[in-house]
Image (cartoon, helix red, strand yellow):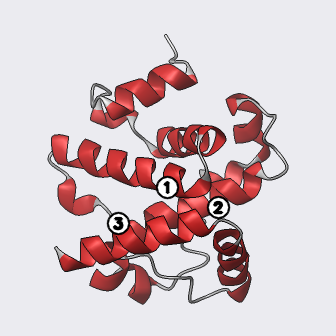
Amino acid sequence: MALTDEQLVCAFESVTLAAPAFDQVAHVRVGWWYLRHYPLGAAIDRFRTGIRRFAEANGAGRKYHETITVAYMLAIAERLADARALDWPAFAVRHPELFQRTPSLVDRCYSKAVLDSDRARATFVMPDLRDDCASRWARLLSRAPEALCATLNASVHTAAH
């Protein structure tokens, strides 16, 4: 039986979702749900917190990557700008690039060296390969100062620990 959006988010937040079920599609779907229900900063913060908790509970805490998490949330937010009224299936069909693995959306914006760096794992780093990614995401963050503050505060906190 397929989960509703709310059931998926609840299972993710309560860490009752089986780890194999939290695949790329589920990651994007949970991020999409948060971005439809919260302002950008709060959505990023809830997603970041949830992924860390989920990873820790499943013995994969070291897999968390701040830059990849925030980059995907920004990419989803961009695509929601003209698709907010779409339900999940329609949104997913309209934006298959969010699920492409090789090269992933992030791989197209970041060099391997940046993504492999400890700095990018611990803090959000702007894209280094494509200026269009960096400029679009900077505009998105500048229009949502709470998102920029939340991202910077979490990044500083993460880097300090």
Residue 44: mark in rendering: 1
Graded by Cα atoms within 10 Å as few (under 14), some (14 to 19) or many (20 or more), the crowding at tag 3 reads many
Say which quarter of the image contains residue 61: bottom left
Q: Residue at x 48, y 44 (%)?
A: 27
Residue 153 drawn at (x, y percent): 38, 71
- Mark 3 or mark 2: which comes first in sequence? 3
Residue 94 drawn at (x, y percent): 79, 44
Residue 102: mark in rendering: none
Residue 107 drawn at (x, y percent): 54, 73
- Mark 1 or mark 2: which comes first in sequence? 1
The residues bearing labels 3 and 2 have C-alpha atoms spaced at a distance of: 16 Å
Q: Amino acid at mark 2?
A: Ala
- Mark 3 or mark 1: which comes first in sequence? 1
The residues bearing labels 1 and 2 have C-alpha atoms spaced at a distance of: 12 Å
Graded by Cα atoms within 10 Å as few (under 14), some (14 to 19) or many (20 or more), the crowding at tag 1 reads many
Q: Amino acid at mark 1?
A: Ile
Residue 77 drawn at (x, y percent): 67, 55
The residue to which callout 3 is attached is 65
Q: Amino acid at mark 3?
A: His
Graded by Cα atoms within 10 Å as few (under 14), some (14 to 19) or many (20 or more), the crowding at tag 2 reads many
In this view, the mark in front (3 or 1): 1
> Farthest residue toward the right?
82
In what element is the residue under mark 2?
helix
The residue to which callout 2 is attached is 75
The residues bearing labels 3 and 1 have C-alpha atoms spaced at a distance of: 13 Å
Q: Is residue 58 visible?
A: no
Q: Residue at x 53, y 81 (%)?
A: 110
In what element is the residue under mark 1?
helix
Q: Is residue 31 left or right of residue 154?
A: right
Q: Residue at x 35, y 45 (%)?
A: 50
- From what the image shows, is residue 19 above or below residue 44? above
